Amino acid sequence: MSLSIIHSRALDGLSAAAVEVEVHLANGLPSFTLVGLADLEVKESRERVRAALQSSGLEFPANKRITVNLSPADLPKEGARFDLPIALGLLAASGQIDAEMLANIECAGELGLSGELRPIKGALAMALALRAAKLDRALILPRGCADEAALVQGLVVREAAHLLDLVNALQPGSETPLPRVQRDPPPRGETPLDLRDIKGQSGPKRALEIAAAGGLSILLVGPPGTGKSMLAQRLPTLLPPLSESEALESAALLSANGQFRPSLWAQRAFRAPHHSASAAAMIGGGSPPRPGEITLAQHGVLFLDELPEFQRMSLEALREPLETGRVHISRSAHQAEFPARFQLIAAMNPCPCGHLGNPTKACRCSPDQVTRYQNRLSGPLLDRIDLTVEVPVLSPAILSAAADGETSATVAARVAAARDRAVRRQGCSNAMLAAGQLDGHLSMSPEGEAMLHRAAARLAWSARSFHRVLRIARTVADLAGSDVITALHVSEAIQWRRALPGRND
C-alpha cells in the first residue's frame, strides 16, 4: 500500500484555494476512482493521465486499485489543472520519483496525451495566493503560463514543457533542475486612442475630465454619430496609471478568466459587453460562481453602449455594485463575493429613432414612444449615475473648422493632480467617499451652499442625488486647485446633474 500527497490550488471565485491531491495505491480489483467534488473535466483527467504516462514511457499502475482524493472535499474543483499533480502523485506512490521532493512544491497543469504540458487559467491567482500564504514552496507550471506567475515578485517559479522534464528533475540526486522563471513587469502598454481625435464637443470633453478626476459615473446622451462611443473609449486614457497592487489584481482577474495578455499589463480594463448580455454575464453567476463583466472591469471602465437596449434585469443588477463596489453571488451550493470597483460610462440615443433634439433631422417618435423608451431605465438606476451629458450634433462646417483640442496626456495630467489632492485630503477618490464622510471633507462657501440648497429644493433631489452633486462639485474644485467649493463650482456641478432630454421627472 502506497500513499503520496502533492499540493495544488483550485480557483474559488477570484482566489486560489489550497488543494491537497492524495493518491493511494492498494491491492484489489483494478480501478481508478477520483473523489473530492470534482466536475466532469477533472474526472476526465483519468484518461489523460493514463495516456500521458504510457506515451512518456512511464509505468501506469494498471493492476492497482487507485484512489485520488482532492481535499478539501467540499470545495468544487473544475478544469484540467489537476492533471499534472495527479500524474506526479501516481509516479510518487509507485516509486518512480522521489516522494519527499513533492513536499516543497505546488503545481498545476493540463496534460496532453503525449505528456506535453499545456497552460491553464489562473496562474497569476495561484502565485498571489501562494505568496499570501507565506509558504516556502516552489510553483511549477507549464511553459506558457509560468511567465504570468513570475510577475509576482518574491516567489520561486519554475516551468516545464513536458512531463518527463519534471520526472527527471524529481529523481533522487537529480542534477537537472527545472529552469527558474524570473521577469520584471512588462512595460505598460500604450493605446493609439487620444482625446485629440475628437473634434469639437468641448462640453462632453469637460464632463469626461470631471468623471475621470472624481472616479464618477457618466451617461452620454445624443443622436447617432455624435461621438459618444469615441468619447467613452478615451476615458481610460485620462485615468491615472494603476499602482502595482492594482495592476496585479486586475491581471489576476483576467488570468482567472483566461484573458490576460502581457500587452495588457498595467492597463486599465475596458469592458464593453453587448446589449444582449444577461444579468449573470454582467454580475457573475454559474456554479461555482464566476466573475462577470463588472468584476472583470475592476479598477477600469465598464462601457454600456445603447443602454436602454440592455435587459432590465441586467441593468437593475448594477444598482448595488455601483453603491458598494462589491457584488454577492449566492447559489444553493456555493456563495461568493467579488470586487466591482469599476467606473461606469454609458451611452444612449434620446429616443427610439435617435433624433430627438437633432437640429438637422426631424424626430419621428411620438411623446409616448419617447417616454416608453426612456422609461426602460429605472429612476433608481439613473439616480446612481453622477453626470448626464448631452452630446450635440455638430454640422460638417463646424467640425472642419474646429481646432485640435487638448491631448489625452494634457488632460490626464490635470486629472492626476486633482486625484492627488483628493487622496491627500481623504485617502480615496471622491467617488469612493461615503455619504457620512462628505461633511468632514467639504469646505463650501456660504454662497455655494445657498445655491446648492436652492437647487435641491427646486429640482426635488433625493438624498443620493444631493450627495452626488456634492461629489461633482468637490471634483470641479479639485480640478481648479481650490480647497473651498465656491458658487462657481456648485453651478457647474448642477449643470451636469440633469434629466434626460424630453423627460420631465
Image: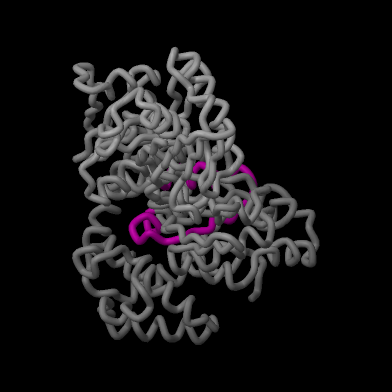
Nearer-the-camera pick, 424 or 37:
37
Query: What residue is at 53 percent from the left and 45 percent from the top?
Result: 35
Residue 222 in the magenta stretch? The answer is yes
Front-lying residue, 235 or 330:
330
Q: Quadrant of residue 308?
A: bottom right
Residue 134: image location, x then y, percent: 22, 49
The quadrant the C terminus occupies is bottom right
Q: Is residue 104 magenta?
A: no
Report whether residue 97 is seen. Answer: yes
Residue that appears at 19% across and 21% down? 173
Which residue is pictured at 64% across the width and 49% down the height?
277
Coordinates of residue 491 in the picture (x, y in percent):
40, 72
- Evaluate whether residue 205 shows in this view: no
Q: Quadrant of residue 95?
A: top left
29, above or below 166, in the image: below
Relative side of 310 to 269, left or right: right
Q: Percent position (x, y) of residue 312?
A: 68, 61
Above or below, 11 against 377 in this view is above
> In the image, which residues are magenta?
209-235
Please name the colour scheme applied to the rendered image: one colour
Q: Is residue 97 above or below residue 36?
A: above
Rendered position, 6 above or below 421 = above
- Residue 25, position in %: x, y? 46, 35
Q: Which sits in the foreground, 140 or 365?
A: 140
Residue appearing at x 49%, y 14% in the figure: 55
Compared across the picture, whether 419 is left or right of 305 comes to left
Q: How many discs appear?
A: 0
